[in-house]
Amino acid sequence: GSMVLLTGCSTGIAAQVGDTKISQAEVQSKVAEILAERRKFDTSQMQLSVNEELNRSELRFLLISAIFEKIAKQAGITVTKAMKDARTASIYNQVGGPANLPQALVSAQIAPSDFPTYVQSVLISEDLVAKLKATGLDQTAANKMVQQMVLKTTKDEGIKINPQYGAWDPANADLVTIDSAGAAVKQLVK
């Protein structure tokens, strides 16, 4: 079964997609950053992940970003500095200025140092959707197609997840708790 593969992950690796490795140290440092930022704001009204769920959400972010970079290479998409600057400016507008970005990132559970990666992933994903819509697909179909690309990339490149972070759900291109994969099965059996 797939569990055997996972134990083959060398220590210190949280996940690997193709030749791209994401270290546990990277996940931990981003999570520490997120938690440090949280302490600066009133988060009582925010729906925030904690503990394992926060680790998983960070790893999911880093994984999807790495996958999008691979898709961009295959699709010949280049994200320029000008594109990043324009998108960053529009995000500043949405949140009411650069001063409000830190709080917006806290509520989105994005580490400040992940923000440039976030912007890049958004631009890649939008570019993909735009290219697909140009072929006549509507927004929903285009989004589905991007999801399919994510799935195909992880199948082609191979994906390994350290079991302490959960398991990859290939049907939904998502990182889930090992339990929730089992729970989904139990639901069906009922």
Image (cartoon, rainbow, N blue to C red):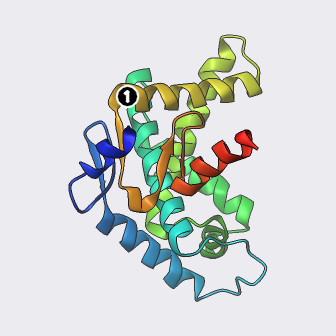
Q: Residues within 10 Å of mark 1 (few under 14, many from 20)?
A: few
Residue tagged 1: 73
Could you tell me which secondary element the residue under label 1 belongs to? helix
Q: Which quadrant holds residue 70?
A: top left
Above or below — where is 79 with respect to 109?
above
Above or below — where is 169 with respect to 10?
above
Looking at this view, is 46 or 100 the one in front?
A: 46
Q: Position of residue 103 (x, y in %)?
A: 65, 75
Looking at this view, is 70 or 131 the one in front?
A: 70
Q: Which quadrant holds residue 156?
A: top left
Q: Residue at x 61, y 34 (%)?
A: 126
Farthest residue to the front: give it: 190
Amino acid found under the numbered disc labelled 1:
Lys
Q: Which quadrant holds residue 190?
A: top right
Q: Is residue 44 visible?
A: yes
Above or below — where is 141 with respect to 175?
above
Quadrant of the image containing the N terminus: top left
Q: Position of residue 114 (x, y in %)?
A: 46, 61
